Image (cartoon, grey):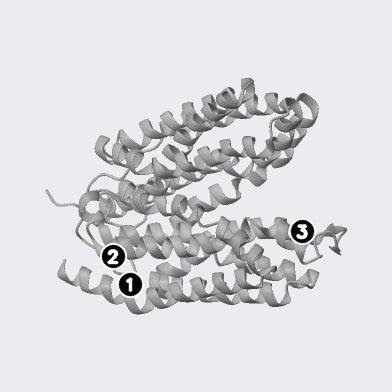
Amino acid sequence: MAISATTLKSDAAASSGTRWTQLIVGIICMVLIANLQYGWTLFVNPINKAHGWKIAEIQLAFSIFIALETWLTPIEGWIVDALGARRGPKLMVAFGGITVALGWIINAYADSLGMLYFGAVVSGIGGGAVYATCVGQAVKWFPDRRGLAVGLTAAGYGAGAAISVVPIREVIAANGYEAAFLWFGIIQGGIVFLVAWLMRAPDPGELAGAAAPKVTQSLRSYTPMQVLANPVFWLLYVMFVMVSASGLMATAQIAPIAKDFNVGDTIVFWGATTLSAALIIDNLCNGAARPLFGWISDHIGREYTMALAFGLGGISYWLLGALGYAPIGFVIFAAMIFLTWGEIFSLFPSTCTDTFGTQFATVNLSLLYTAKGTSAFLVPVANLIQSATGSWHMVFVVTAIMNFAVVALALFVLKPLRARMMAKG
């Protein structure tokens, strides 16, 4: 039976509407779990005041969360892909919604450090389940706009906490941190659970009407074991670690750096101190970087975009170290670092799926995402360098060199290596 052009156009339009719906649902889920990481700081001092536990002991819960949120994603991603397009995403995200809520409910009633740590374990499992699935959804539904789609999804996680920071602070001030943990845990996890049932991955051939991608993509899907045996994956892993570590070495130390530069409490504009202005602008830049450079990479290619972003990043580290002693300079150059660092969470998943295909995309990009956890172990190196030299200058020199090294790897190693690999099919 002949199929009319009108029918084909109708099917393509329906598929287009479906994938944008899926993207929006994924972004909503990412916004709702953002507080697990970015809202944690609001609870630390209230917990310390209520129980008298040391800050370092409380912060261990955060480290546990990050470790599990990162390192368990390959398992969660494998389950998503194994369960299939129709069941995998919805079941994993629904599970994530339950565990996210449960983790914060446990925190609300935690009367010992052990119970607080258990809450971190549960919320870390749930956060990773939602994160891995939503990013996997983005790379699968948007082969033609993969960088932009992943960037928008990652931006939901990077900037989502901005929506609820003030409400959480108000609840903590009025009713205590326990009430904030309880009610926001139930609300956030509950909404994730409900919208999870709208999620699914594309069926085979469903995206046939999508525009052809402007970047080269593999027609073959590599299994996780094949990916782990491939040198391209490990090159991407090393590059991810280097950029992530350099960013964390600087971004995790913004407050101490501002203090040592004697600019933290200086008023810069509208009554805001240098540190306050920097933190607000930095978070905006961190969120904006992900879709911005993802979109650029869809048009000029992943490696060229890496060179552009990380090259600017290297310059930004050097400028902050050299000119950050001026309050305005500190705000501007710190913002540039965040703008040229956050895009790793869109560029690397996109490159991974371009290279290794979509069938096992969720687990494969989750394997690469563990580089975030690996890079966290390098953050204390910044403090060691600062203590050994007595200043932050060498820290910025090292982070700049790391970014420039990744630029060279992207252009002169990754690009030809991927080209040869894809040419073989």
Q: In terms of sequence position, does the residue under pointer 1 or pointer 3 come before the other?
A: 3
Q: Read off the residue under disc 3.
A: 275
Q: Nearer the viewer, residue 75 or 263?
A: 263
Residue 144 visible in the picture: no
Could you say where residue 335 lies in the image, as x and y percent from the top left?
66, 65
| Circle 3 SS class | helix
Q: Nearer the viewer, residue 367 or 55?
A: 55
Above or below — where is 71 with respect to 48? Answer: below
Q: Is residue 111 left or right of residue 119?
A: right
Amino acid type of the residue that numbered disc 3 sits on in the rendered structure: Leu
| Circle 1 SS class | helix
What quarter of the picture does the C terminus occupy? bottom left
Contact between marks 1 and 3 (CB within 8 A): the answer is no
Q: In terms of sequence position, does the residue under pointer 3 or pointer 2 come before the other?
A: 2
The residue located at (48%, 29%) in the rendering is 122
Instruction: Give the CA distance from mark 1 to mark 2.
Output: 7 Å
Q: Quadrant of residue 257?
A: bottom right
Could you say where residue 154 lies in the image, as x and y percent from the top left?
50, 52
Instruction: Give the CA distance from mark 1 to mark 3.
Output: 37 Å
Contact between marks 1 and 2 (CB within 8 A): the answer is yes
Q: Nearer the viewer, residue 332 or 399?
A: 399
The residue located at (83%, 58%) in the rendering is 272
The residue located at (30%, 45%) in the rendering is 202
Instruction: Give the CA distance from mark 3 to mark 2.
Output: 40 Å
Q: Read off the residue under disc 1.
A: 414
Q: Read off the residue under disc 2.
A: 232
Amino acid type of the residue that numbered disc 2 sits on in the rendered structure: Val
Q: Quadrant of residue 247?
A: bottom right
